[in-house]
Image: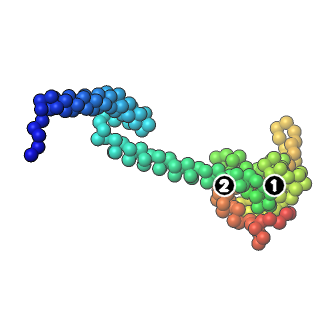
Amino acid sequence: MEDPETPDSLRARVDALERQLAAMQAALETATNRDLPLLKGTIRSLVATDVETIDEFPMVGAAFGERVTAHGNRLDQLEARVDLVTRQSDTSTKAEKIAAVLTFAQNKADRTGKVAVTPAEIRGCTGVSRRYAYDLVEAIAADVDGVRIRESRQVKTGSGTKRKQKALLVDCEAVHGLDDAVNSFTTANGGDGEV
């Protein structure tokens, strides 16, 4: 048979339970008065959305995750484009030099889509010598559809005559973008041969 508890031992147990309850209430008040508003404020600033209750956290978090994924995909696309431009700006092979010239022409083109690229501009965008720039004029005109040579000539102007130097005339619409143009002029050895 169990000993019946004395009123003093019962009182001591009730006091201990009251202290535990008071400690739990203090911790809960801290969470509800400080931690939850802090958490809601943090989530509001992260997701740029007004969050009123804890029940909204999963829905807001899922929407935020979708936005992060979409931005990540867009970032991957932009990094791929930057990589393509970076690879095309390294003009160590003939194909890369031609790609750099065609990229320059695309950037220079006006609303008509047609542009003249001079040997001096070819030197600037590829870093080749003056002589090799003239060789590239010949090679590009021969290898790329939509590109032809404008021979050097004298033209009459209202104030006299002016010399137009030899240049590539690039029809950017006919070239149909850089990747198609690169494919149209690469040689059997991958465009690595020099002119």
- Mark 1, residues whose alpha carbon is within 10 Å: few (<14), some, or many (≥20)? some
* Horizontal arrangement in the rendering, residue 89 relative to residue 21 (left or right): right
Q: Residue at x 62, y 52 (%)?
A: 81
Quick one: label 2 or label 1, which is nearer the N terminus?
Answer: 2
Badge 2 amino acid? Leu
Q: Nearer the viewer, mark 2 or mark 1?
A: 2
> Residue 69 appears at what percent x and percent y?
47, 50
* Horizontal arrangement in the rendering, residue 147 relative to residue 56 (left or right): right
Q: Secondary structure at mark 1?
A: strand
Pointers 2 and 1 in contact (C-beta within 8 Å): no
Q: Residue at x 65, y 57 (%)?
A: 177
> Residue 62 appears at what percent x and percent y?
38, 47
Q: Which residue is mark 2?
A: 84
Q: Secondary structure at mark 2?
A: helix
Q: Residue at x 87, y 42 (%)?
A: 161
Q: Residue at x 31, y 34 (%)?
A: 52
Q: In the image shown, does 1 or 171 lie closer to the viewer?
A: 1
Above/below status of 65 relative to 191: above
Gap between marks 2 and 1 measured at Cα: 30 Å
Residue 25 in sight here: no
Residue 42 in sight here: yes
> Residue 109 appears at what percent x and percent y?
69, 48
Q: In the image shown, does 138 or 124 lie closer to the viewer?
A: 124
Q: Quadrant of residue 145?
A: bottom right
Q: Quadrant of residue 188?
A: bottom right
Q: In the image shown, does 94 or 47 lie closer to the viewer?
A: 47
Q: Quadrant of the C terminus?
A: bottom right
Above/below status of 194 relative to 111: below
Disc ID at residue 150: 1
Badge 1 amino acid? Arg
Residue farthest toward the bottom in the current orientation of the protein: 188
- Mark 2, residues whose alpha carbon is within 10 Å: few (<14), some, or many (≥20)? few
